[in-house]
Image: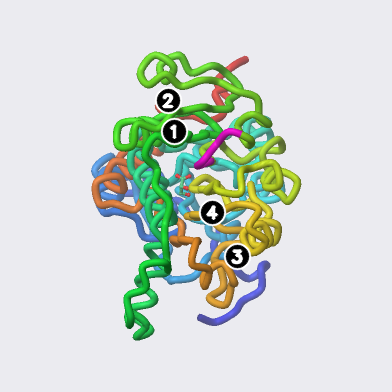
Amino acid sequence: MVQVSFAELCKHAGKEIVKVAGVIIMKVFITRKITETGVQLMRDAGLSVTEWTEKRDLTQEELIAHCKNYDALVSAGPNQLDRYFLNACKHLKVIALHSVGFDNVDLAEATRLKIPVGNTPGVLSKTTADTAFLLMLAVSRKAFFNHRRILNGQWGFFDPTLNLGIELDGKTLGIFGMGNIGTEMAKRCHRAYDMKVIYHNRHRNEQAEKEFGAVMVSFDELLQQSDVLSVHASLNDGSRALFDKQVFTKMKPSSIFINTARGAMHNEKDLTEALQDHIIWGAGLDVTNPEPMQPDNPLLSMDNVAVTPHIGTCTEETREKMVRLVAANVIAGLKGERIPYPVNEEVYRG
Ligand code: DGY
């Protein structure tokens, strides 16, 4: 691709108005290719849709230049929709996120600029919980490490004392953030392994307490009592870099740390040292800090670690459901209606 300056990009992006038979067509820009159903739903609603098809992330300036010529943005991936971006694109009528997480958006600024921001709640909870469950099980039986042994020609001689995992049956699961995804993870662990569920959350989750006897505990109790501690909170100032050396030190030496929420919630150097120094037993990560994780990261060669590349919602069914919510947010936003899945409700107040 030819590199052009920001000024050039803005000039070319222009303020072109698309008219068909005298009718102004609203335009939607998507930061990457998404499941076709979503695009089709928007086109069926009469919108002009453009996807960024290059297999690289747009820089912020490229994104701004593109958005200048569009009415709605669908953001899928890591672009930071910060104060600078939002002020440069305050003409946007709606921003639809292809995610449940919205930590990449300056919501206060979007609200101040009266831009509704929508996400994809609910439809991905089970899939993400499946990923957490998969990692928990993979770590507990050193599955990724044992797979590598075969690839490396190390199946070899059977030694009954080597490569032993730990069992999950009847153990204590600690959930940090008992929202929809945390509840689904707890349900799976309770049903499959009769695990006792404790949780730390801003509010009580009565459904979880009733359905599988979950008990709300303090953060320190969560650290001290969990055999598996699974992170399901959203990333904010309170949870950023929360899981550091001091926190890992309070966990059981036999415990497993699982993070399928956001990598920025754990300090990866501290986590690596906690595993190397046997402060905790194992870790399963679907999110890393930073992303993408580099192939020479020491975590990837540890026998008690399982890492997947942020595939929490990555099934055909879930992606299909997600794009339907994305399209619903875009279509409503462009019609000037209240979007169905807003993360900044305040935009509709006052
Ligand atoms: C989400 O929906 O937030 C997933 O983590 C994808 O970013």
Rendered residue at 36%/51% (across/down): 134
The one of 73 and 33 positioned closer to us in this rendering: 33
Q: Which class describes the residues within 10 Å of circle 4: few (<14), some (14-19), or many (20+)?
A: many
User: Which residue is the site of mark 1?
Assistant: 333
Rendered residue at 61%/43% (across/down): 252
Query: Quick one: quadrant of the C terminus?
Result: top right
Query: On the image, which quarter does residue 273 sit in?
Result: bottom right
- Amino acid bearing label 4: Cys
- On the rendered structure, is 318 left or right of 278? left
Query: On the image, which quarter does residue 147 sit in?
Result: bottom left
**SS at badge 1:** helix
In this rendering, is residue 8 above or below 71? below
User: Which residue is the site of mark 2?
Assistant: 337
User: Which residue is the site of mark 4?
Assistant: 67
Q: Earlier in the sequence, mark 2 or mark 4?
A: 4
Q: Is mark 1 within 8 Å of ligand 1?
A: no
Q: Position of residue 285 (x, y in %)?
A: 50, 55
Q: Position of residue 304 (x, y in %)?
A: 50, 61
Query: On the image, which quarter does residue 2 sit in?
Result: bottom right
Which of discs 3 and 4 lies nearer the camera? The answer is: 3
**SS at badge 3:** loop
Whether tag 3 and tag 2 are in contact, CB under 8 A, the answer is no
The one of 181 and 63 positioned closer to us in this rendering: 181
User: Which residue is the site of mark 3?
Assistant: 59
Q: Position of residue 31 (x, y in %)?
A: 46, 57
Q: Earlier in the sequence, mark 3 or mark 2?
A: 3
